[in-house]
Each structure stands twice: as C-alpha cells, then as structure tokens.
Amino acid sequence: MNLQDLLIDIHALEQELLAFERKYGVRSEIFYAAYVSGEEPDNIDWMLDFGEWGSIYRTWLTRQAEYRNEVDRVRTHRPGLSGLMRVAA
C-alpha cells in the first residue's frame, strides 16, 4: 500500500474505533490492553462487539506500523516533509 492508501485506511479504522469508544465509554488502547490480557465482557451481548473492536484495533496498529515504515522508506529517497508530501499527494 502507498502512503495515501494507508492514510485512508487508518482514518476509516479510526472512525470505527471512535464508534466503539463512544458506545462503551472507553478509549481503544485501554480496551485493547484488557482484551489481550483475556478480560471478557460482563454482558454476553457485548462479545461480538469486543471481538470486532479488538480486530479493528489490531488492524489499526498494523496500518500505523506500515505507514511509519513507508514514511521511512520514502524519506531515504526524498528527505524532509516536502518530499514526503509530494509522494503522498
């Protein structure tokens, strides 16, 4: 994926994360830390949401890392913010 595609994907994932954060009143990073440590929801009706939320957050983390790696790769050929912006535009 190129920088623009990664950024579009990151923003879409963030919108999904925000929906869960608003619904449950917890930031995604707090939820995810509890989720990966094995905590399960008190309400059985939340199970599907928790699985989806965890998956979206994990994908968001992956896309963030891919974005940083692509930025580093681009900067080796076009140093500076202007060079990066030319590639991303």
Image: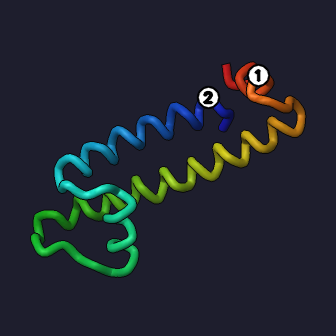
Q: Amino acid at mark 2?
A: Gln
Horizontal side, residue 7 vs residue 37: left or right: right
- Residue 51 horizontal/vertical position (percent): 30, 64
Horizontally, residue 52 falls left or right of residue 84, namely left
Q: Is residue 73 left or right of residue 38?
A: right
The residue at the far front in this view is 80
At a point 33% along the width and 73% down the height, the residue shown is 34
Q: Give the camera-side residue of 78 and 60.
A: 78
Residue under label 1, please give it: 82
- How would you rate the neighbour count of disc 1 (Cα within 10 Å): few for under 14, some for 14-19, many for 20 or more? few
The percent position of residue 26, horizontal first and vertical second, equals 25, 58
- Residue at which label 2 appears: 4
The answer to which of marks 1 and 2 sits earlier in the sequence is: 2
Check disc 1 and give the amino acid type.
Answer: Ser
Residue sitting at x 40%, y 53%: 56
- Quadrant of the frame with the C terminus: top right
Camera-nearest residue between 5 and 79: 79
Nearer to me, 84 or 2: 84
Q: Residues under labels 1 and 2: Cα distance?
A: 15 Å
Q: Is residue 51 above or below residue 13?
A: below
